[in-house]
Image (tube, rainbow, N blue to C red):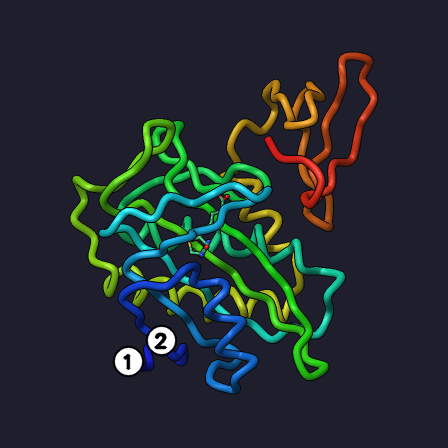
Amino acid sequence: MQQIINNFTLHDFSEVKSTNDTAFELIINNQAFDKHIIIAHKQSSGKGRMDRKWLSFEGNLYFSTILKIDNINNIYNYSLLTACILGSTLQEFNIKTYYKWPNDIIFCDKKLSGILLQMQQINNINYLIIGIGVNLKDAPDYAISLQDYNISKEDFLNKFTKIFNQYLEQYNNFGFLPIKNQWLKNSYKIGKKIKLSNNMEGIFKTIDDNGNLLLQDNNGKIHKILSEEVFI
Ligand code: BTN
């Protein structure tokens, strides 16, 4: 079933393996294009970052947004851009979240939402797939859900797409800097001691103009951490 909301075309499925995979399949078959969203009520093989699984309980939100992009050097800007869009969407429901580098949304110190970016060139066009899972109803132990807030998927997507348009316009007109500043205002553990997945430890100083994390080690040396390499 297809529906248009706020200039985004929605493809609604009851179950798929992964909405990211379905997005690529539909693009290849000329059935989905820029600013299309694939949503599924269940995923049988939901994917997380670093080859992890994304448990896909019925009731949560699973969707992938397709964006045609010109500059593939900037794709990691879209992680932080998407975090800002999700955070602003949740703010509309009076839910204050924090952005954990590079692409998690944190509520009450637990993971509420995750973002998986994938890119593929099809017919010489670069497509970025932004896969998003939001725990609206249920969550594994280490995470948190919004079950007490009664947020419908329709309401969430309606606000999300409206805010997505505003951020895209800002990004196209003014570049990454305003997004970076917005992200920093809501960042999780900034200025605090953190441990990365490669066991490096240090103070999370800031992010640079490309969205890389700057980590200060015990000797005061600053290390630039690229988002595709390491995560908190
Ligand atoms: C992470 O935090 O590791 C990223 C999780 C991303 C999950 C979403 S759910 C919709 C889309 N389809 C997938 O298979 N994964 C993403």
**Crowding at label 1, few (<14), some or many (≥20) Cα neighbours within 10 Å?**
few
- Mark 2 lies on a secondary structure that is strand
In this figure, what is the number of numbered marks? 2
> Outermost residue, bottom direction?
30
CB contact under 8 Å: marks 2 and 1: yes
The mark found on residue 11 in the picture is 2
Report x, y in % for residue 23.
48, 70
Seen in the picture, residue 53 relative to 18 is either above or below; the reply is above
**Crowding at label 2, few (<14), some or many (≥20) Cα neighbours within 10 Å?**
many
> Residue at point 60% right, 55% down?
178
Indicate the amino acid at tag 1. Answer: Met
Seen in the picture, residue 146 relative to 33 is either above or below; the reply is above
Report x, y in % for residue 57.
28, 47
| Residue 146 appears left or right of 63 | left
| Residue 78 appears left or right of 113 | right
> Residue at point 28% right, 51% down?
60
- Mark 1 lies on a secondary structure that is loop
Question: Which image quadrant: the C terminus?
Answer: top right
> Outermost residue, top direction?
218
Mark 2 Cβ inside 8 Å of ligand 1: no
| Residue 162 appears left or right of 33 | left
Q: Nearer the viewer, residue 32 or 166?
A: 32
Seen in the picture, residue 188 relative to 94 is either above or below; the reply is above
Question: Which image quadrant: the N terminus?
Answer: bottom left
**Residue identified by numbered label 1:** 1
| Residue 40 appears left or right of 79 | left
Q: CA distance from mark 2 to mark 1?
A: 6 Å
Indicate the amino acid at tag 2. Answer: His
Quarter residue 111 falls in: top left
Quarter residue 36 falls in: bottom left
